[in-house]
Image (spheres, rainbow, N blue to C red):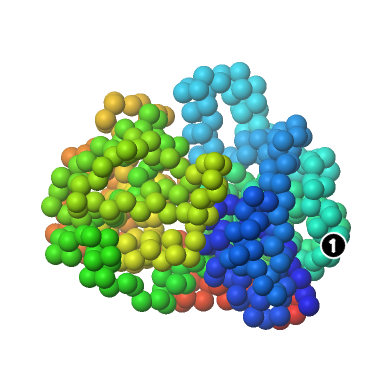
Amino acid sequence: MPTIFLTCFHSLLVRNVLVPVLPQLTSRGIRAVLVVPDYKLEYFRKTFGGPSVIVEGVTPNLPTRSFLGLFFKRLNANMVRSQTVTIQQRYKREVEGKFLYYYGFFLPLRLLGALGFFVKLVHYFDYRLSPSGFIGPLLECYRPDAVVLADVQNENDVAIAQCSRRRGIRTIGMVRSWDNLTQYGSRFIPDHLLVSSEVIKSEAMRFLGMKPADITVIGIPHYDRYLTEPLEGREEFFSKYGLNPRKKTIFFAPVGDIYVFRNALDRAILEALSEMDVNVVVRFPPNDTVKCLDGYKPRANVWFDRPGQDFGCRGVQVKELTADDDKRLMAAIGASDVVIAGASTILVDGFLLGRPAILLAADSLEGLDYLRSTRRYLDYDHIKSLVKSGAARVVCNLEEMSQAVAKYLADPGLDREARKNFVVSYCGGKLDGKSSRRTADAMLYFLDIAS
């Protein structure tokens, strides 16, 4: 039986890759060995284990517990010559006060990152010197035909890939999200790369130096269910969560503490929405905190959804999104009339289901400057394209938000063509519900495994 290793260290990969793609592989006689964090071993075995799926746990993040592993991770990320990285480095300098770090490390790396030979030299020494031996025993045990890196930027995936290449095992990488290449680049160039769209393909050519023939556009596998499964009825959804089916509904995804300096924004947004004559569905970010809403008692017209499989005291950033979480998200957006979120793919989820969306860049609550406000995200490479498309209304204060909500509730058709066009671009034109199969086909073909 042909065997592949499939990595799963990021919490979105269960939803993005395993649920839609794994059945496509096992149904064609492939044995998959899932490599996961050791503390999630039982969860993965219970959820995915079977005759064709073996789950093995390893201690995560071992590579960056060493000096060299952490050094090469930071070195690579700060060589990326993107607007996103430029803004992040300015934040470190001006907000966190890391002037020496900026002028002694960030700035020289940005200059050297323009030199192709220097980037290749860094990758060479990274490959030769970074620790990766923790995966050796598993590779020796199962002797896989190929290794699939479900999140090619992840430090654990990088270490597994480096060790695999030393043993002559072919690798295929996947880009987890639309902001990854402009934010992190990649420390490892796989034999083949799967991407969601032509935009990401062009970024892989620009930032990773990959050839077009080594990249395949497959669309977005977890969107297959959005395109093929019927939405839960509005009446059923409202009845299940105690909301009024006769009222319009706002879907609100809090921005989260990671993205907001001294976050009071999310509470202010929620309080403004809850005073409107609408239902408010609040979906908390699964991998972030929203401390300003701790202990908040929602009104009768507000429902809180806190997705993610928890793993005890390890914090929210290690939660796993389940198939039920994704199904509930799809139902909630489908039952809503307007989606409100920060710089998040939630906006695109709304577009895909035909819902108008509002992008929060609200920063006037405390008079924050550019780098401390959410305005800076509008200049990140991936968000700039969204703003330029006109698919979402950008609001910078509560008054603008209320006006945008009123306009969309009165006329949901506003910006409809822009939304459709953005979704086509974001999904690489692959809106046929077959991205999961395309992904499996590409894995098997480019890794020379007979299907």
Q: Which residue is mark 1?
A: 141
Visible residue check, residue 172:
no
Q: Residue at x 35, y 53 (%)?
A: 305
Q: Residue 202 location in percent, x, y?
A: 57, 56
Depth order, front residue of 125/303: 303
Depth order, front residue of 312/386: 312
Q: Residue 73 location in percent, x, y?
A: 68, 39
Residue 200 found in image quarter: bottom right
Q: Residue 105 location in percent, x, y?
A: 65, 26
Along the horizontal axis of the image, is 256 left or right of 137?
left
The quadrant of the image that shows the N terminus is: bottom right
Q: Residue at x 68, y 51 (%)?
A: 38
Q: Secondary structure at mark 1?
A: helix
Location of residue 336 with respect to 365 vertically, above or below: below
Q: Residue at x 64, y 50 (%)?
A: 39
Mark 1 residue type: Cys
Along the horizontal axis of the image, is 56 left or right of 287?
right
Along the horizontal axis of the image, is 187 left or right of 254?
right
Residue 368 found in image quarter: top left
Q: Residues within 10 Å of mark 1 (few under 14, many from 20)?
A: few
Location of residue 66 with respect to 207 vertically, above or below: above
Location of residue 389 with respect to 89 vertically, above or below: below
Q: Residue at x 51, y 76 (%)?
A: 434
